[in-house]
């Protein structure tokens, strides 16, 4: 039984006769192959990445598992269409908070057409990519059983400034993630911090990007996922970093991906600052305890 | 007594009635203030940098010391003109080998005019900046007492590909740095390697750039300097890294300089590779020794 994913925060979405990804109950995610070069390029990336023995296993875990391609009934009713079969990274998660962050101050690759470069260039300038080295492309943050998720409209996300990005990254790890409230960053040390936290995972990725010259990841996203309820109930945050969207990956040709690395370092700085700040808050709070 | 510097490898050069920097015998470097915003911007940077107490001393040493501004006779005979008074970083050096590397895949800042961005963008694409995250802007490499320096023409430098850059970075630390010869990388471990070597200095800079959000250094150069003769005679390489050219520095506003950091990491990767390779060569050679 294929169905529309519950937790998609960016990209083309299935439903209302539109083409988009589907999931099944066995933990698979079916992504329709885009009809232009993007589709074949993403298949090429997954195939090449899967078989490349130079990718260390601790890096491989940041990528969805690839199970090949398959013809399945497309979500828009256009009949059987080729889909990438990938790991459904949200399978088994109840109320995941997710931020989709497109990394890089530029989303276009040097070999692209002039029109394409111009289009991306305008978008990178309008959005926060040029200034921050990354931009938030989609998000859902779990608030409570009563109010569900905060999932702002695309138009709002497209207007995010550096300050908005800071606020979202703080709401992501707060117990009071409601609009108009100063986020308390309660879960910072469990979700961002610690040896299995988001920051540690991003630093592991960074270390790889300082050396790897195999691929350049243009217009690729880092997904940050966590489950706040689990922190409270089980003291486990479910903090996970995944890379997705490889339609614009090109060969590295012996050069590191300085565009991705620069953006990733900028994101790491944003998160480190929240962690340092919240440490200070926690320390202050414990000093004030009777 | 002011004179034209002996070891300038890039930028406007004095002489033949042209405006350019001058040096004196006391170790000062006089750089004419460019008449447009660039002049005042560079003065502003040096003033602000000098007085900023958040710059650690181990980072300050990568910048030329600033001694204010002074009216002196300009090199083009136009009378007294304002100059920046800086440390002459080549003072006391006999036959320094120098590479001037402009860091960043883009040399323009987001606030610049559309015309300026377009001009820089074209240059960054034609030269190696976009691909490598940096470009060589000038160089002189000491060969021998007989043949002096290899100092290629600007037009040749402007055509440098990734492979040319690799070759230049190898010639910089070779005893046989002649055209058409495969560089032997004899001095790699003393000039690039070691605790005081170029790589260690670049890594120290990188560590700062991962955190500092005070300045964004657009169109700024890393100078790499060494003295091959000293390695042979005194077992000291004179390896030094300096940052120069701050006419396009802008405020960081709480964001790291991901454009500079990305390019710097790319340069570090090029140099690490040469060092690793030459280690392998040295190991092989010592294994082959009787």
Image (cartoon, coloured by chain):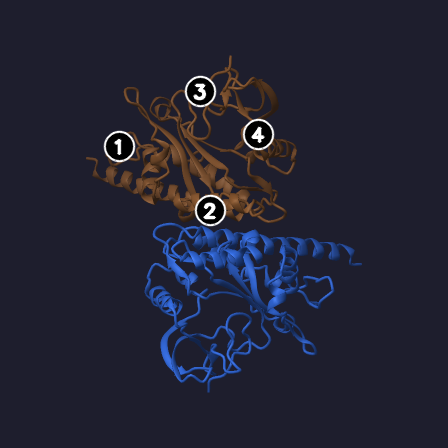
Chain colours: A blue, B brown
Outermost residue toward the bottom? A1
Q: Name the residue that disc number 3 marks.
A: B15
Asked if both marks, 1 and 4, belong to the same chain, the answer given is yes
Could you tell which of marks 2 and 1 lies nearer the N-terminus? 2
Q: Is residue B85 above or below residue A214?
A: above
**Label number found at residue B194:** none
Observer able to see residue A15: yes
**Label number found at residue B121:** 2
B95 or A240: nearer the viewer: B95
Asked if both marks, 2 and 1, belong to the same chain, the answer given is yes
Q: Name the residue that disc number 4 marks.
A: B35
Q: Is residue B4 above or below residue A78?
A: above
Residue A209 point in image, percent of width and height? 44, 54
Asked if both marks, 2 and 3, belong to the same chain, the answer given is yes
Q: Nearer the viewer, mark 1 or mark 4?
A: 4
Observer able to see residue A128: no
For label 3, the crowd category at 10 Å Cα-Cα, with few meaning under 14, some 14 to 19 and many 20 or more, is some
Could you tell which of marks 3 and 1 lies nearer the N-terminus? 3
Could you tell which of marks 3 and 4 lies nearer the N-terminus? 3
**Label number found at residue B179:** 1
Q: Is residue B140 above or below residue B286?
A: above
Q: Where on the picture, by quarter, is residue A8?
A: bottom right
């Amino acid at each position: 039984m294929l169905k529309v994913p519950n937790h998609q925060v960016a990209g083309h979405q299935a439903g209302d006769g539109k083409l988009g990804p589907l999931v099944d109950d066995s933990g698979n995610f079916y992504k329709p192959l885009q009809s232009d070069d993007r589709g074949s390029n993403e298949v090429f990336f997954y195939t090449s990445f899967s078989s490349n023995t130079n990718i260390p296993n601790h890096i491989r875990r940041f990528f969805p598992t690839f199970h090949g391609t398959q013809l399945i009934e497309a979500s828009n009713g256009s009949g059987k269409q080729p889909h990438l079969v990938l790991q459904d990274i949200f399978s088994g998660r109840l109320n995941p908070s997710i931020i989709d962050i497109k990394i890089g101050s530029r989303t276009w690759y040097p070999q692209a057409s002039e029109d394409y470069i111009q289009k991306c260039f305008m978008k990178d300038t309008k959005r926060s990519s040029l200034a921050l080295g990354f931009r938030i492309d989609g998000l859902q943050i779990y608030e409570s059983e009563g109010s569900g998720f905060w999932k702002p409209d695309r138009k709002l996300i497209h207007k995010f400034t550096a300050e908005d990005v800071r606020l979202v990254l703080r709401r992501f790890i707060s117990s009071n993630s409601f609009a108009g409230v100063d986020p308390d960053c309660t879960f910072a040390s469990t979700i961002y911090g610690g040896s299995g936290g988001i920051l540690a995972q991003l630093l592991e990725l960074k270390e790889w990007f300082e050396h790897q010259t195999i691929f350049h990841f243009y217009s690729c996203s880092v997904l940050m996922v966590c489950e706040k309820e689990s922190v409270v109930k089980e003291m486990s945050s479910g903090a996970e970093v995944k890379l997705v969207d490889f339609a614009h990956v090109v060969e590295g040709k012996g050069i590191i991906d300085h565009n991705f690395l620069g953006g990733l370092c900028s994101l790491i700085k944003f998160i480190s600052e929240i962690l340092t700040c919240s440490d200070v808050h926690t320390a202050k709070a414990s000093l004030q305890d009777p």
